[in-house]
Image (spheres, rainbow, N blue to C red):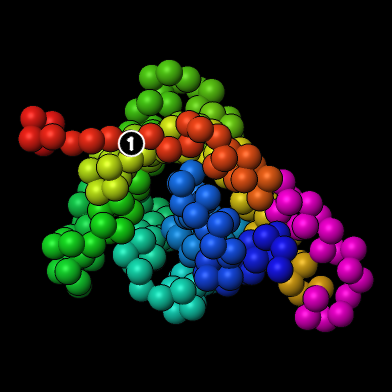
Amino acid sequence: KKPEASLEIGYLTGQRSALPEYLNEQMRILGLTHIVVASGYNLSILVRFSRRLVARFSKYLSVAAGLMLTFGFILVTGLSPSMTRAGLITSISLLAWYFGRSIHPMVLLPTAAGITAVANPSYVWGDLGWYLSFSAFAGVIVLAPLVGQYFFGKKRNNAILQVLVETSSAQLMTLPIIAYAFSQYAPLALLANLSILLLIPWTMALTFVAGVAGLLSLPSWLGVPAELILRYMTAVVERLAQMPSAVAEINFTALTI
């Protein structure tokens, strides 16, 4: 099976089990597994799209559609720590938007962490994914706005700059945890994410069109755009993962701890 086809399945189902072992490992090295597995990023794309699509007709229907989409997405993908966090925060954000309220990040973050910790205390005692998920989220909603305002000012609304700041902030916040847990980090992770993240919404849409075309026996050329963008992604992953600087090791001693 072509890696592009397995990657397409990953986008459609939110699972990476269909990925070839070598591609899965390369994406792990570059910190890109979050683009395939069901994550808060995928959920946010779907909810934002549905909200903009339905909001023109009814604010109530927009929130209802977003909540149903969130519940359905979690129902399909399962209650992983990252999805639990993403679903909770998305639901709170939708309700706050409906009532015309805003929630400060320093309130939203500990509130969501506390609710998920009470719901499943095992997250706190030894779930690395829970810590990584909230660390990355803290980077996006707390550190990224500060960095963007300080360095770019009004230009922070630029899509490329926004991805750059949010990605680097999330990776900066998760770096200590990853380095301590695995004794290594990915120097090329930022470059890999910047090369791919901006294309994720288009990729999700095009793979969905290709999947529907295949199910309904529609013309095969409808799947060509998805194949091209997926071929680009696999080429970027394979090229960067094979570079000598793709992985760097960190050795902790008693002094560093």
Residue 48 vertical placement versus 213 (above, below):
above
Q: Quadrant of the C terminus?
A: top left
Q: Nearer the viewer, residue 183 or 36?
A: 183
Q: Which residue is mark 1?
A: 249
Residue 12 vertical placement versus 53 (above, below):
below
Q: Amino acid at mark 1?
A: Glu
- Image quadrant in which you'd find residue 95: bottom left
Give the percent coordinates (x, y) of residue 241: 55, 42
Q: Is residue 198 magenta?
A: no
Left or right side of 111 for 41: right
Q: Nearer the viewer, residue 111 or 16?
A: 16
Give the percent coordinates (x, y) of residue 8: 67, 64
Give the percent coordinates (x, y) of residue 99: 38, 59
Magenta segment main secondary structure: helix
Label 1 packing within 10 angstroms: few (<14), some (14-19), many (20+): few
- Image quadrant in which you'd find residue 56: bottom right
